[in-house]
Amino acid sequence: MAAWRDVPKTEWRRFFDEMSKLKVPGKWAEIEVAAPEVGDQIVAEKLPVIGITYDSRDDLLDVALDRANRLIRHPQAIDVEEEPIGIVTIAVLDDEGARHIIRLTEPLTLAP
């Protein structure tokens, strides 16, 4: 059964650095954006993940997919959905109230 957990802002950089070390590149993902003014939209469909990084200096989450980058400025909250075998979804709330949902096509297991 999947469960959601909040990733504290103090851990964002380390969390995404750890993801990069554990072969996020090579995984595939899609990105959906749910925003009050436009509704739900798929902005990237099943593309290879190049990397996901958080830049604390610019307060920017960069989701790099093959042929598509999603820059999420000033994230307010980051939650992950985990199944017993790993992370399947990353949800990011930005400062304008839009939710960016990154769905991995196969779970990613992080070190404890």
Image: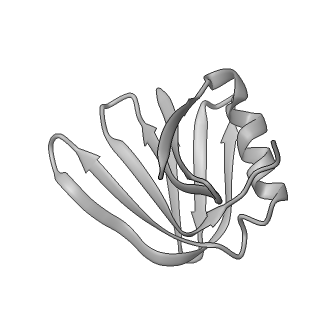
> In screen coordinates, is 86 left or right of 22?
left
Residue at 67% x, 33% y is: 12
Is residue 75 among the parts visible in the rendering?
no
Task: Count numbered badges in the picture.
Answer: 0
Camera-side residue of 31 and 69: 31
Instruction: Please provide percent x and percent y for residue 25.
Output: 72, 69
**Looking at the image, is 81 positioned above or below residue 7?**
below
> In screen coordinates, is 58 left or right of 40?
right
In which quadrant of the rendered view does residue 61 lie? Answer: top right
Camera-side residue of 60 and 16: 16
Residue at 47% x, 78% y is: 46
**Looking at the image, is 5 positioned above or below residue 50?**
above
Instruction: Please provide percent x and percent y for residue 16.
Output: 71, 45
In which quadrant of the rendered view does residue 42 lie? Answer: bottom left
Instruction: Please provide percent x and percent y for residue 94.
Output: 41, 34
Camera-side residue of 36 and 105: 105
Residue at 61% x, 24% y is: 8
Is residue 85 among the parts visible in the rendering?
yes
Camera-side residue of 74 and 22: 22
> In screen coordinates, is 48 left or right of 110?
left
> In screen coordinates, is 98 left or right of 82?
left
Instruction: Please provide percent x and percent y for residue 2.
Output: 48, 50
Q: The C terminus appears in which quarter of the rendering? A: top right
Q: Residue furthest front?
A: 1
Residue at 78% x, 56% y is: 20
Give the color scheme: rainbow, by chain, secondary structure or one colour: one colour
